[in-house]
Each structure stands twice: as C-alpha cells, then as structure tokens.
Image: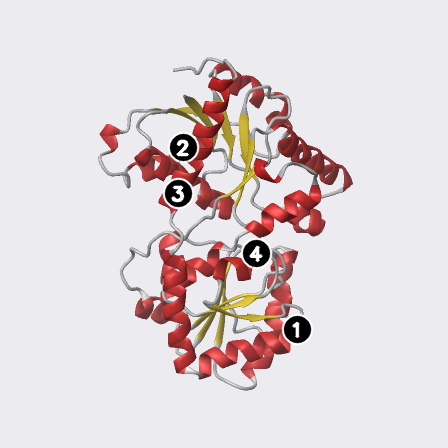
Amino acid sequence: MKIGIDARMYRSATAGIGRYSQNLIKNLLEIDKVNQYILFMTDEDYREFKNLKSQIPNPKQILNFKIQTTNIPHYSLAEQTKLAGIIEREKCDLVHFLNFNHPIRYQGKFIVTIHDLTLFHFPQAAQKTNFIKRWVYAKIMRQAIKNSAKIIVPSQFTKMDVLKFQKLPPEKIAVIYEAAAPEKIKNQRSKIRKKYNLSQPIILYVGQFRKHKNIPKLLEAYKILKKEINCQLVLVGQVPEEYRQIIDNDADLRDTKMPGFISDEEVAAWYQAASVFVFPSLYEGFGLPGLEAMTAGVPVVSSNRTSLPEVYQDAAIYFDPSNPIEIADKIKMVLKNEKLRQRLIKKGKMVAAKYSWRQTASETLKVYEEIGKRKLENGMEIGD
C-alpha cells in the first residue's frame, strides 16, 4: 500500500499532537518494511524530522518513505481549498490524518485520529475563537467521523465521548493508547535546581495553559500549601500574558517559576528535579504528561476527571479539580509521606511501562492493513 500521513503538526510546538506524530512515525518507519509512506509536512516540520531520522537505527535501510513538503498551515482556509488536491496527486491508497482537521473535499480512503473533543466541552479553550470558527470546527469534526474508514482514539473515555457526540457503529472506533518516551537523558536534577536556585520540594506542572487545564485552581492550592509547608511551584509551558499578570500581581504567587516553552531535554530535567507532579485538568483525552512524570520516577497527583483514572490507574493520588483545598491536601500528603511517595513511584513506573510507542505503531499498522484488506475484498486494486 501507499500510505499518506498528514504530518503538518509534527513539530514540537504543536505539543501533544507533535509528540504523537513524532513517535508514531518514527516507530512505523522502524517496523514496517512493506508499505510505502508519503509524509506531508511543512518546511518547519521537515526540519525537525531530519533530527528524528538520526534516531532511527540504520536510517539508510529505511527507503520506503518520501517527504512531500506542503506549506499549508493547519486549521487554515488553504487546508480546505488546496490540501485535497496535493494529496490526491500522490495517489495514496490510504491517508492517515493525525488530527481531526482534514480537507472535507478529499474523496480518497482515509482514517483519522481524534485526540479529544475539548472544544465541544470547553469552546473557550481555543484562543481567538468565535461562533463561526466553532461552527467550522464542528463541521470538520463531524465530516471526519462520518467519512473516515476508521477512527483512532487514545482512550476508552474518548471513544465514549465520540459516540455521544455522533451516532455511529462502535466498531468503527479503535482505541490505541499512546505512551511516554523512555527516559534517556542523564540525570540533571542538581543542575536544574542550581540554575533556578531552588532548595524546596518542587511541585511541577507541564502542559498548556488553556481554560480546561484548570491552572487557577492549582494556583489557589499553592497559596494554601505555602502556609503549611516549604514548597516551590514550577509551571512548564508557554504562559499566556493573562496568567503572568495574575501571578505577578499576587504577592503569594510571585515566587512561581515559569521556564516557558523549553526543549524536551530541559522538560526531562524538570521531571527529574520534581518532588511531585500535579495535573489539575478538567478534561483530557489521554493525559501524556502524567505518564512522562511516572517514567521519570515522579509521584503523580491528578484530577479524577475524564480519561485520567483510566490511563493512570492506581499509580496516582486523585482529587476533585474544582476544590483547591483538596488539591493542596493531596499534594501535601505525597510530600510528607515518604512511604506513599515510594509506593507511587514504583507503581508509576509499572503503569507507564504498560504503554509503548512501538505498540501504538503496531496497532495503528493493523488498522492500515484492515482497511487495505477491506479494499481488496471489495475488488479494488491496491497501489504500489
């Protein structure tokens, strides 16, 4: 088969979708020597892909792919007016759109990954959104669900969420879990603490700062904690100006460390330096940062909402994310109880080890083969 992959959100700046794209493509190219892959990327994505190629064993042996540079931004008008024609010229037997945003004019066979339905539950999560944009979002999402040959989701929760959103046969949805990348960087705990002049236990958050991430409740919890124990809050990610103003204008929050959007290596260093990882989100399709923390040996304190208990299982302490007092109590419990900390660290590594990107790629490849077999049974010719 000739398989097209829409990798225009491959770069790290696209956060979770970027990590998904990078790890899925890397592992697909390592395990599949039969099918041919066409990767549709912007120039910016391709620059990062060049770095990935150096991480693949024996890169000269990986000959079954090519890059088609396609400088069409995701969520753009050109995505709907021009992208379909570019993909159709490659005559792919199957195209995998790694996010719901696909050109609705595309007539070929395709599958789509739907990571979550955040914007339906939290329409304010998208910056600069308005009624028209929300209507377009809903239209494209419904077309993706309706016209795709298969839908991939990262959790049972997201599967049920999609089924509530639009009626369709449950078997059309494949649940394929994601994973945390293995921890390979050398220990940077002391270096990162020295760089930021930190001596107290670190409460770490890694992620975006959209409304559903529930950062204001975490800040309230931190103010409560500071009155009871020595601790330091660190927020890793691109911090919007509104949050900077909230923190700068509150004397009890001004010591909050905000390294910003940093490299994967520095994120890994923060995980190593952390005493506890806290994830207060109101809605997650999977919740990758918590697994990354577990892989790094950090105890996790998490919201009890949506997919998080499904993914983290018994390896986290859970709280009601609407209650900052409870958030503070659960964080303090982990910081003060060394026996509990060690139990969470041990369980966290066990749970994180259940997930692997190699397995994600293998199960995704089975979906490709299922669709390819279906085409053969319908009397259609498979390409190259």
The answer for how far apart the CA atoms under marks 4 and 2 are is 32 Å
The answer for how far apart the CA atoms under marks 3 and 2 are is 15 Å
Few, some or many residues within 10 Å of mark 1 (<14, 14–19, 20+): few
The answer for how far apart the CA atoms under marks 2 and 1 are is 43 Å
- Secondary element at tag 4: loop
- Secondary element at tag 3: helix
Query: Can I make out residue 373 in this image?
Result: yes
Q: Quadrant of residue 276?
A: bottom left
Mark 4 or mark 3, earlier in chain: 3
Mark 2 or mark 1, earlier in chain: 2
Q: Please state if 116 lies on the left or on the right of 180 as rendered.
A: right
Task: Please give the name of the residue rendered at 23% of the width and 29% of the height, measured from the top-left corner.
Answer: 60
Q: Where residue 318 sits in the image (x, y, percent)?
A: 55, 70
Q: Residue furthest right?
A: 131
Looking at the rendered structure, the kind of residue marked 1 is Asn
Q: Identify the residue under disc 4.
A: 307
Q: Identify the residue under disc 1.
A: 323
Label ID, residue 23: 3
Of circles 1 and 4, which is in front? 4
Q: Identify the residue under disc 2.
A: 46
Q: Where residue 5 sits in the image (x, y, percent)?
A: 46, 29
Looking at the rendered structure, the kind of residue marked 2 is Tyr
